[in-house]
Amino acid sequence: MNWFNKHFNNTSTKFLLIIAVLMCILLISADYGCVLQDLFLGDADWPMFKFNSERTSATDDFDFDTIELLWRYEYDLFEQAGASRISPAASSDMVVIPTRHFLNCINTNDGRIIWSQYIGENYSSPVIYKGNVIMSSFGAIYSFNLRSGSFIWNKNLTKEKEYINGGASVAAINDDKIYYGLRGRADSEGYLYCINARDGSTIWKYHTDGTVQTSPIVTEGKVIFGSDDHSIHCLDADSGDNIWTYYTGDIIRSSPAVHNNRVFFGSNDSYVYCLDIEDGNMVWRFKTGGKVTATPTISEDKLFVSSNDQFLYCLNIDEGRFVWKHRTGDSMYTSPTVCGNKILLGFGDSIYCLDTKDGSLFWSYKLDDVGTSTPLTIHNGKLFFRTTRFVYCFSLS
């Protein structure tokens, strides 16, 4: 101890120790393709589809009254525009969103393009993880550095013998593992892949009897996803072994969400389901008047879910009891975003704001374009989404 006190009190020794620590951090950051600053940013505020790995799409950090346009970025009509439901991911002063063939990183303060990478046809959403952006497209999974846009790795899906050109689902990432679904060689075949987030190498894959177009969730060592084989599957996240499978009356295009050891999702059989996460047994189900393809949103004791019967439903999360519904006048493929006591929906050419308590309309905002992404993304008091031709940024004030 006397030796330690003697040498550590020396200013030069202190300096050398600090340098050594910083060098270790830089080595770790280089291994993951990120920079030193990224390590101190913490988790991104909205790093993935529907906010977090539980897909709750809700934040209670603040409330607001209205929205005000800050900036709008217009795509090149022929190279990047096109109808899309792609949801942005945001971290620090950057929002990342794909267009028709490109992955773009935009400065959240002024709408300036920071970098842009060609990735080919895509209908997926990016995930920000450890200073990198993971993005799937028709034919590949990519990893780029968040700040510079520099290429880290890509996985060529066309070399997977099970793959048919249909794109990959929105990825889920946990513990350096990336999970995503693929269409197989026919509509009656699909796969869930688990790959290494460091280099894209395959860890395991799981076969289903239908295309996997839903985004998986990862929680408590389990990965859960829906398939066109009419079922929701729960696997061991490390090994890919099946834990349980629950069958519904039709295909599942609604990505699941999880809360308090329960799994919530919709099916094309028009039901909203709640299952026990441990054994897959049904806790309750609620029938709507149309297909349920949107992912549910969870906030406190309420579940919000859209149906193709033109209604947004609010259900009691514990019992599946009906609370209220709001008629939109159009088929609802939109997943709602909850901020405080307000629900934000984008569909058609407008943004709608509803009261979480009774579904009444606070206000609507008409856009200059159609095809809003879903769900809407909230980050640092700002609202982000894309349409056919634009990326919009509004302040929540």
Image (cartoon, rainbow, N blue to C red):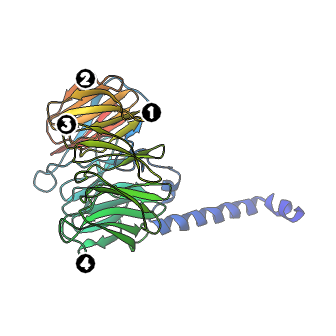
Disc with the residue nearer the chain's start (1 vs 2) = 1
Label 1 crowd (10 A; few <14 / some 14-19 / many >=20): few
Q: CA distance from mark 1 to mark 2?
A: 23 Å
Q: Quadrant of the N terminus?
A: bottom right
Disc with the residue nearer the chain's start (1 vs 4) = 4
Q: Secondary structure at mark 2?
A: strand
> Which kind of residue does numbered mark 2 sit on?
Trp
**Which residue is labeled 4 in the image?**
161
> Which kind of residue does numbered mark 4 sit on?
Lys
Q: CA distance from mark 1 to mark 4?
A: 44 Å
Q: CA distance from mark 4 to mark 3?
A: 39 Å
Residue 322 x %, y %: 32, 29
Residue 242 x %, y %: 41, 65
The reply to whether the C-beta atoms of the residues labelled 2 and 3 are less than 8 Å apart is no
Give the quadrant of residue 388: top left
> Which kind of residue does numbered mark 3 sit on?
Gly
